[in-house]
Each structure stands twice: as C-alpha cells, then as structure tokens.
Image: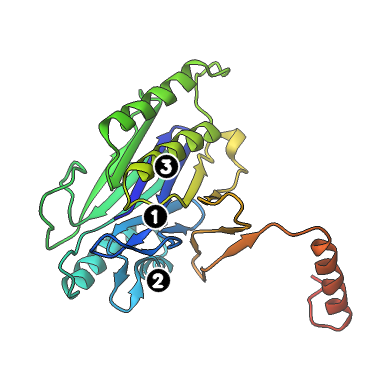
Amino acid sequence: MTLIATCTTHEYIVQVSDRRLTWPNGSVADDTANKAVAFLYDTVFAYTGIAQMGDEKTDQWLAGILKANFSLEDAIQTIKEKATERVKSLPYANKRLAIIGACWASEKEIGPHMPIIVLISNFHDNKGVILNTTQKTFSRVNITLKPSKPFGYYFTGQLLPSQDLKKLGRNIKRAIEKSPFKSKKVDALTMRKFTVEAVREVARKNYHVGKNIMLTIIPNRQIPEHSNKPTSFYYFPEDKTDPVSYSPILVSRKAIFSHIKLRNLKEGEFDKIKEQIKKGKKNGFVSKD
C-alpha cells in the first residue's frame, strides 16, 4: 500500500506519492507505477490500496471519471459512487482503497480559497482515521487548514511513524521561525524538501514504500504574486542517474494525457530536433502556427 503525504500552507499545496506496487505476499510488482492524477491544473488526486479496478489500472479508472465531470464537486461525488459500485464487484480479498484529493476551494460560493484535502475511502472513519475493517461503501472527509494555523499535513496508506511525523512538524516550524518573510511563511521548496525526506525515511524502514517519488505543488492563485504560477510536477528517482522523469496523468475537460516520460537532451540533440522541425515545416508536415 502506497504512502500518500499531503502538506498544506496558505500559499501552497504539496502532495507526494511513492510509485511502488507490491503483491499480497509483499514482493515488488512494479517500482514505477503512477498513482497521481492532476485535474484541471488546480487539483491533484492520488490513491493508495487497490491498484487494479477490474480491467483498468486505478489511476486510469480515476482519470476517466474526472474527464467525464465538469466540476470538482461533481467529480468527487461520482468517484464515491463509482468506487463503491466497482470495488463491490472485485474478487480481491483485500478491497481497501483511499483516494486523496488536494485543491484550493472556498467553503462558500463566494470567499477566499483555502487548501482542502478530500479523502474518499472505504477504510477511514469520519475523522480520517484508519479503521480495522473495510466498509461496503465509500465515505468522504474534508480536511481543511484553519486560518490560525501556518501549515498542516495528512498521511495515509502506509503510516508515518509518530517520531517521523514529529520530526516533520519540527522541521517545518523551524523553517517558519527562520523565514525572512515578515509573515513568517514557509515556501514551496522547503515544503517539498521536508515532505520528500519524510517519505524517503519511511521507505528506508518499510519495504512496501518505494523510493521513486512523484510530487505535485499547487500554488494559491488568489494571492497576486502567485496568480501566474503553474502547477508544478517533480519526479525524484531512487537512482539519481536515471535520465527519465515521469509525470502524473493530466486530465482536462477534453483530454487525458498519460504515460508521459521526460528526459534531458544530450548535447547537440536540441539542435537536431530544431532542424527536423524546420524540415517538417518546409514539407508541410508541421503547422507554422
């Protein structure tokens, strides 16, 4: 079962998922499995638990539901209903599944955006605490960051040991105390650093958690200085020499982009690509627009 870590401040949301899948006997099935889906560039979901929803991978199943919905609220309700229906029919002995969304939203129709974590699960109670038994239906829990608190975090799946959770809290608090900003805010890169370190620390102790990590950062675009900042994706491989980077599945209202792989170009490759594009334009194969 994956470890999903979601950290929030009033300026950024950071969500981290490892990429390891294991068989029921504990052996590794896949160490590069995607578990994150970005929706409309301002919301991210990740799952922990069942990796296969019948004949579809869980991330692909989730992306299909998101694409068919035009609002976040409709998508969340549909995920709840479809997950209950699909999981009920699966032949697995272990049917645990939790889908954790993170977004900026207002609790009222008009009002400032706040970071909200949405937990859709069949093995958590109404406070987001893991239950001993799997429920027949999926429930929803909203976890919000109070205006009086500078940061918050929620971990599920493979749990973060209490000493590591306290360490993460201490690190973020120290970063806030040392912050050069008058408002004593913590920046996105600091949140990224400490969250990745926390997940990697669990991976060193827990064989079910992988060291290949996907991370998403969503800025609060209601803040003027962040209004033009994009949602950012980062891939942290266990092998730092690996030239390939990955992305979550990206879902818009019209399309799904999956199996995205990126790598740094070797010296001279970019010039060759530009030359190929020029030739393509001359031959009418590439639009000049």
Q: Residue at x 51, y 54 (%)?
A: 41
Separation of residues labelled 3 and 1 (CA atoms): 20 Å
Mark number displayed over residue 64: 2
Query: Does residue 234 lie above or below 143 as drawn?
Result: below
Q: Residue at x 79, y 77 (%)?
A: 286
Judged from the image, the secondary structure of the residue bearing numbered disc 3 is helix
Mark number displayed over residue 45: 1
Q: Position of residue 267 (x, y in %)?
A: 81, 58
Name the residue carrying label 3: 200
Q: Position of residue 142 (x, y in %)?
A: 27, 44
What amino acid type is highlighted by mark number 2?
Gly
Q: Position of residue 113 (x, y in %)?
A: 43, 39
Image quadrant for the N terminus?
bottom left
Question: Would you call the spot at circle 2 few (<14 residues within 10 Å), some (14-19), or many (20 or more)?
Answer: some
Query: Does residue 16 lie above or below 261 as drawn?
Result: above
Is there a contact, CB below 8 Å, between mark 2 and mark 1?
no
- Judge from the rendering whether residue 84 lies leftward or rightward of residue 152; answer left or right: left
